[in-house]
Image: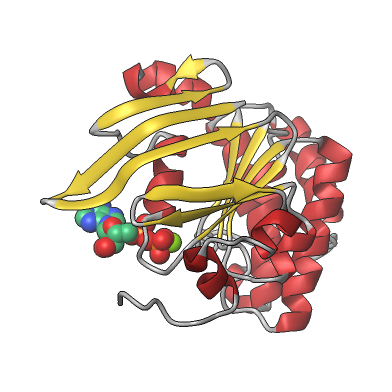
């Protein structure tokens, strides 16, 4: 579903991505791990079409993203759902209006259809009945669920999650992971999740890739990554500080 080759990106001389290669099979859950500031969000933003590579290939759902712009890019992005780091809900809208937003703006559905789909989406994330509240009136865990409902309400083929559990206590982290797995089981979307929840995230991953110094240094099934011989991977998953930092 996703094929990235030699993706490079610098900001004002700082090389953030130095040749990222990644293939994401259709219907899989691929998790990207790596140190803070290592370029995980920058990488996701390329997949979403929010940033353009300096060089390299970027193919999503059979389309070469690096060549698209304007309306053609918008068309491709309709097939995505995104849960941004921190949730990125609109504070001035109720939870319900937040979830309705992509249906109104991206799909331009009629109001009764929107109502029906929003009810379903809120119910799927266990939030039936809280729709009238504003994001600041609900708990942090609920806000993450609202962000997931908003990402999934368009029934996207691909869903990107950027650190979906940041700031949650361990019990809620596991609840969100379980929810992602349930939603994935029901809808079979292709998922790319950036996460620092190690080892918990390994339980829902089909594959784990480590981004380090601008490249995917190792990728494989979670049990393979957990037993990696690569010292960089080992140090990271054991929670040891970066020897080079
Ligand atoms: N739009 C931008 N302009 C300039 N530098 C950026 C921009 N976005 C990210 N960076 C830099 O790229 C590096 C990687 O950031 P990021 O992808 O957010 O890391 P991560 O998500 O892995 O913690 C950081 O040094 C950050 O400051
Ligand atoms: Mg980030």
Closest to the observer, 180 or 29: 29
Q: Residue furthest front?
A: 229
For residue 123, side relative to residue 76 (left or right): right
Q: Position of residue 181 (x, y in %)?
A: 82, 53
Say which residue appears at 68% left-offset and 63% top-offset: 227
Say which residue appears at 83% left-offset and 62% top-offset: 178
Say which residue appears at 72% left-offset and 82% top-offset: 170
Closest to the observer, 130 or 21: 21
Say which residue appears at 42% left-offset and 54% top-offset: 41
* Vertical side of 33 occupied by 244: above or below: below
Please say whether residue 69 is visible from this viewpoint: no
Tally of numbered tags? 0
Q: Position of residue 155 (x, y in %)?
A: 73, 34
Instruction: Answer with the quarter of the image where residue 114 lies.
Output: top right
For residue 3, side relative to residue 143 (left or right): left
* Vertical side of 56 occupied by 207: above or below: below
Q: Position of residue 105 (x, y in %)?
A: 53, 34
């Amino acid at each position: 579903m996703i094929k990235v080759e030699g993706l490079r990106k610098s900001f004002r001389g700082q090389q953030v991505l130095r040749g990222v290669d990644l293939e994401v099979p259709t219907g899989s859950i691929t998790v990207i791990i790596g140190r803070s500031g290592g370029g995980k969000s920058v990488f996701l933003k390329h997949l979403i079409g929010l940033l353009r590579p300096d060089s390299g290939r970027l193919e999503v759902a059979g389309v070469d993203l690096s060549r698209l712009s304007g309306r053609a890019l918008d068309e491709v992005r309709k097939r995505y759902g995104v849960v941004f780091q921190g949730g990125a809900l609109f504070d001035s809208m109720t939870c319900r209006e937040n979830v309705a937003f992509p249906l109104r703006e991206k799909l331009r559905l009629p109001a009764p259809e929107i109502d029906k789909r929003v009810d379903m989406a809120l119910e799927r994330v266990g939030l039936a009945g809280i729709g009238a509240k504003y994001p600041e009136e609900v708990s942090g865990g609920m806000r993450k669920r609202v962000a997931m409902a908003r990402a999934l309400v368009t029934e996207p083929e691909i869903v990107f999650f950027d650190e979906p559990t940041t700031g949650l206590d361990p019990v809620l982290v596991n609840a969100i992971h379980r929810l992602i797995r349930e939603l994935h089981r029901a809808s079979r979307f292709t998922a790319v999740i950036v996460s620092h929840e190690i080892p918990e995230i390994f339980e829902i991953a089909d594959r784990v890739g480590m981004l380090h110094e601008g490249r995917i240094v190792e990728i494989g099934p979670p049990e393979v990554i957990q037993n990696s011989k690569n010292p960089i991977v080992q140090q990271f998953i054991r929670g040891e500080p970066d020897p080079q930092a």
